[in-house]
Amino acid sequence: MLSLLCAVVMVFYVPLPPGFENMSPFPLPYFDDYGDDDDQNLPVPEIDHEEWFEEQLEADLKWSFALNGVLHAETSEFQDIVLLDTKRFGKALVIDGKLQSAEKDEFIYSECLVHPALLIHDNPKTVFIMGGSQGSTAREALKHKDLEKVVMCDIDKVLVDFCRLHLTANEEAYRDERLQIAINDAKEELEKSEEKYDVIIGDLADPIEGGTCNHLYTKSFYQQVLKPRLKDHGIFVTQGGPADVIAYTAHIPSYADSWGWVLASDEELKLDVEELKVKIKERMKGDLYYLDGDSIFSSTVLNKTVSTA
């Protein structure tokens, strides 16, 4: 039976990866002597009166970064949509006050969500994306040359149009004839169709009280709706972290934490580094900026805090 999933975002804090050391938003003056008589003459850092984006991550934890400004804003039937121009992470999409992606590192999330499932599968031809309004998940899936069909199903047409207009990195994906866009609730779309898919991807907002996609994180949905729409040997991937599946993580700087995903299937899922390398070379067009065979495998090695949680 397809392992039943629960959406549990795995969060633990680690230093920024190589390349970000010199990007600290908190530059400090260098003092080579402390307690010196000249302390009163030490330089005082200037305080910039800038605009900042601030997100409440937990009751006692906030995350913020400086802005150049607000590029675009719109309100749909379902949510408030804002595109920010941030100093560190470039364009950043914010929905209902929650950061969804940032230009400088969204490829980490998107590559990790898409490619492990498609590379582990023996011969994927069809993909169904639940959500995915930004187009980044479709962009990564369409790098697989042998895919014949990718369906992106999102409930919010205003958000899809907003992202299509303003997130220009995904323009090529929208021009790909293999991409089909359905404006609908993913549950309803899967229920009304008899088609089955090799891979189903959950690219959804976090399950929060009153959220539009909470029902897509339930056991009943996985059992009664999603599983019947997977072909034999099909794979389902989403963010989260239950047992009895392949779980893997990656650090995403703009999220200020490490994120987790899980793969589940009726079949035993096996990771072979050399086989992954061959599949990446043979199946894909375009570059991966974050993943390769070795990093896919290593991402499944969870630290003790996460693996025993």
Image: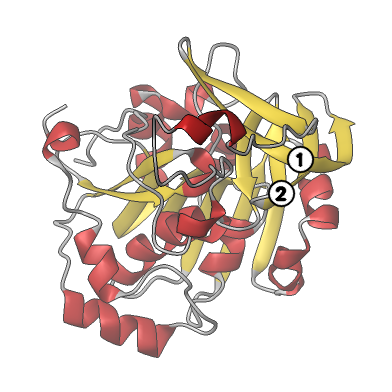
Query: Front-most of 291 and 274?
Result: 291
Which numbered disc, 2 or 1, marks the residue that appears first in the sequence? 1
The label shown at residue 87 is 2
**Residue of label 1:** 67
Q: Inspect this view and state whether residue 138 appears.
A: yes
The residue depicted at 21 percent of the width and 54 percent of the height is 300
Amino acid under disc 2: Lys
Farthest residue toward the front?
37
In the image, taking residue 265 as reference, residue 256 lies left or right, namely: right
The residue depicted at 62 percent of the width and 35 percent of the height is 99
Q: Is residue 182 above or below residue 284?
A: above
* Quadrant housing the C terminus: top left
Label 2 environment density (alpha carbons within 10 Å; few <14, some 14–19, many ≥20)? some
Q: Inspect this view and state whether residue 155 appears.
A: no
Is label 2 in contact with label 1 (beta carbons under 8 Å)?
yes
Percent across and percent down for residue 241 are 27, 35
